[in-house]
Amino acid sequence: MVLETEYWKSVWRELGAPKIPVLPYAPRQRRMPERLLRVESAWKGIESILADLIEHFQIGRDRCLEFGVEFGYSTAALSCFFDSVYGVDTFGGDQHTVNKKDIFLDTRALLAPFPNITLFRSDYREWISRDNNRYDLVHVDIVHTFADTFACGLWSAQHAPCVLFHDTESFPAVRRAVAQIARCTGRRFYNFDESHGLGILV
């Protein structure tokens, strides 16, 4: 049961509207990236489809932006495919994370061997208020509320041709936010149902 006003407002607004189709994403091949971090992560499994996803949707490989780094597992995986990866996080956890302590120094040390990763300690709202750059891909894995996912994801869809959203299977609010962004932007919504779900907007 989702206890969030914005989620239910979205449900109410869309009563009677055509449903946004969610297309299954089935990778044609799986290949592990060259470098990975040895840390626990709910993202494990997704790293094996990145090469397929990038090729399938013909994603450029210059710049990637990630909202929600935590200990850097997904950041490290993404860095194997992009010239530059920018990781944005408060590094202090949120209502949906187990970790609530400041992990910035720990994460920076873990990712030190990855020279093409740059970390920024910032709330996504601060970041999107001042960043007008374009990216080849944006990954959104922040606090799993409808309102936050929608705000961050809509900005991301306006600044990149492909946006990934983790936890579309674990959090109904995330899945609804991705569908709502697809409705607003005319993007196609694909979903990879393993590893807690990965929404793909293209």
Image (cartoon, helix red, strand yellow):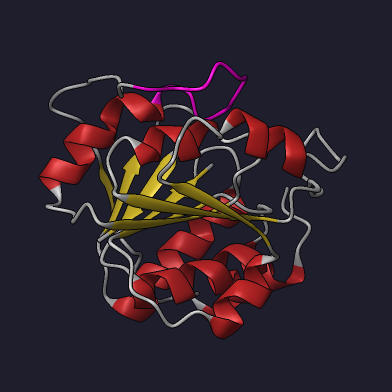
Task: In the displayed orientation, state which residue is furthest to the top.
Answer: 38
Q: Position of residue 77 (x, y in %)?
A: 40, 32
| Quarter of image, res 33 | top left
Characterize the magenta stretch by its predominant secondary structure.
loop
Residue 36 magenta: yes
Residue 188 spot, x, y in % from top left: 25, 62
Look at 37% across and 78% down and name the residue there.
158
Q: Is residue 191 magenta?
A: no
Foreground of the two, 117 or 186? 117
Work out whether 189 lies above or below 150: above
Which residue is located at x 78 percent, y 57 percent? Answer: 3
The quarter of the picture where residue 80 lies is top left
Residue 144 picture location, percent across and down: 65, 52
Q: How many marks?
A: 0
Answer above or below: position of 9 versus 26.
Answer: below
The residue under the point 33% across, 74% down is 134
Looking at the image, residue 70 lies above or below residue 177 = above
Q: Residue at x 48, y 67 (%)?
A: 153
Q: Is residue 155 left or right of residue 49?
A: right
- For the C terminus, which image quadrant? bottom left
Q: Position of residue 170 (x, y in %)?
A: 58, 38
What's the magenta region?
Answer: 35-45
Q: Left or right: 112 with respect to 145? A: left
Instruction: Give 105 or 33, whichever is nearer the viewer.
Output: 105
Residue 179 shown left or right of residue 32 in the figure: right
